Image (cartoon, coloured by chain):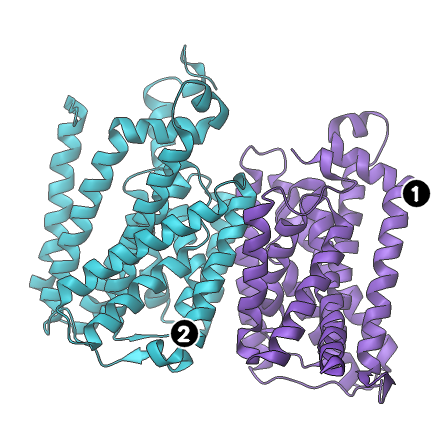
Amino acid sequence: MLSLIGQAVASGVALGAIYALAASGLGIIFGLFGVINFAHTQYVMIAAVVAFVASSMGAPYLMALIIGVLAAALLGIITERAFIRPLLGNEAVQVETLFITLGLSIVLENLTLLFWGSQPHYFNNPFAGAIEIGGVVLTFDRVVTIIAAALVFFILHIVTTRTRFGKAVLATAQNPEAARIIGIPVDRVRLAAFAVGCGLAGLGGVLWGTIYSVSYLTGGNFLILSFVLVVMSGPGNITGILFCSLLFGITEGVASAFFDPKWQRLAVMLVFILVIVTRPQGLGQGTLARTNK
Amino acid sequence: MLNLSGNDYVKVVVGIAVFGLFAAIPLFVTADYILYVLSVSAVMAIIAIGLNITNGYVGLLNLAVGGLVATGSYITAIMLLRGMPMPLAIFGAIIGGGVLAAIIFLIFARLRGFFFGLATIAAAEVIRLLIRNVDDVTNGVRGLRGYSRLTDSSATTYWILLIIVGLVLLVVGAMVRSTLGLRWRAIRENRDKALSMGIPVLRLQFIGYVISGMIMAFGGGLYGVLLQYIEPDIAGLGTLVQAILMVALGGAGTILGPVIGAIAITMIPEVLRVANDLRLVIYGLTLIVVVLALPGGIMGSISRYIRTRRRPLASQRPGVPG
């Protein structure tokens, strides 16, 4: 019994680590600019697809992973330049970017379906084997995922709180005009944040693909979850996203271990609704919170 | 309640003429397929009119469209399959939509602006998952089929739907022009100012959200009856994109905008004769183009054109905050 719980929690943590990576970029972009990018989780999918294609063309796993992440970051840069920037300064910027990126999301998903088919593809998993601690078995790919997420969030925390770039990002978030006046390249900072956020989503996507499979639905799988995570953790609360993701992952792990797996997503939504009813402001306010009105 | 000026009588005459024109279509076109497509756009128009109340007039971002539409179609289909008459089944859909909308609003009412909208997506997802999982009632992913039709003649079906669209338009139009509609717009323009003027913001938002939900579920019920097949993905993002596109293309916050948007959105894939797979790609691309190139939608662009020709811009008139 105890090892069953431990097993459910352990695989839940691995799942939560992927959710955290997928949603982190959304948290950055929304926390900073109030820009909702509905296509965000399609970068998860694109990265996984690109990495899979690279890997099936003979690229070693690490190289495929980097190519996938770069593809996602590049797509993020293109999105920012082509669709977000033209709308900035517009009064209804939030609603308009939401609509545009919703359209973009549907286009990316269905184009992938058209050109890549609906079949799930399976990575040649480089992380064979598993570790066992006290009866709890965790495959290596899951261990790698957890370590990657921990590293990413540690670096994010350091960057936003300790570095000049982090300060520039915060300044841009608080008051873009004032930041521009004191010489911060506001546009470039925003572009960098987009690239990083989408790249992180891509990292989550490749790792997801490695553990499970890649298909055109991979991004849609995360879409609603990522937004729920951002709403639940509260504006600008990056570490809160990690916490909520783990909570979601563990909820799913436990729900699928003790009930039918088909109820796991509903269990997560129930957790979300409970949190919102009791704490509508989200779980906490992070470093960037005061900037988001 | 209705305060008609000279300009409005012109609108009434034009409205009746356009309605008559649409009603006359089956007299000349007998192809079942075309009447079917027209019927689909009528049902879509009802859904878009419903969405336009929250997104266009109350200024409340409602992204639970799929959930509300699916609730309507499933309630109707299940009631029909249990042998209940059509009017009762449709009525059930309307009530179900109202109840669901009330629950969604009460759960998320304390979230502001964008966060409210995002949270309502989760509500739609809950509905989709429930429909998938409670398969002894909903038949799960296999969907429901084999329930009764509206009528056996596609012309009669089209006429019935046309009359329903006309009635919904009249009711919503009257609502929007009443004090209620005025207050909705006050909330949309400046929530805090409306609150300080003593407008019961939360209660009026609630009313708007519930009415919107009832209309969308009504449209959903008719949608299922028309298509004769429903599945859980009606509660998914495809429905949301389609509905948002209809409202944005036609013009949010205008009475006729959603109808024009619905007709355009149903016709575009038919005219282009594309495969069903490409339909969503076209919807997505259209949405991007509309937002970038046609702010305010078709109706917004028309009225902006008229306004700039006839009189000064709203922002230049005294007493109107720009």
**Is any atom of residue B301 visible in this view?**
no
In this view, the residue farthest toward the front is A1
Q: Which mark is residue B276?
A: 2
Q: Give the color of chain B as drawn.
A: cyan
Q: Position of residue B59 (x, y in %)?
A: 43, 37
Q: Label 1 is placed on what type of residue?
A: Arg
Q: Which mark is residue B35?
A: none
Q: Is residue B110 above or below residue A265?
A: above
Q: Nearer the viewer, mark 2 or mark 1?
A: 1
Q: Residues within 10 Å of mark 2 (few under 14, many from 20)?
A: few
**Is any atom of residue A119 visible in this view?**
yes
Q: Is residue A143 above or below residue B124?
A: below
Q: Chain of mark 2?
A: B
Q: Chain of mark 1?
A: A
Distance of label 2 from label 1 (alpha carbons):
51 Å
Q: Position of residue A20 (x, y in %)?
A: 73, 61
In this view, the residue farthest toward the top is B318
Q: Label 2 is placed on what type of residue?
A: Asn
Nearer the observer, B59 or B18: B59
Q: Circle 1 — which element?
A: helix
- Cβ–Cβ under 8 Å for marks 2 and 1: no
In this view, the residue farthest toward the right is A163
Q: Is residue B182 above or below residue A59?
A: above
Nearer the observer, B320 or A8: A8
Which residue is the site of mark 1?
A162
Q: Circle 2 — which element?
A: helix
Quadrant placement of the N terminus of chain B: top left
Q: Position of residue A66 (x, y in %)?
A: 84, 70
- Identify by letter the chain in purple: A
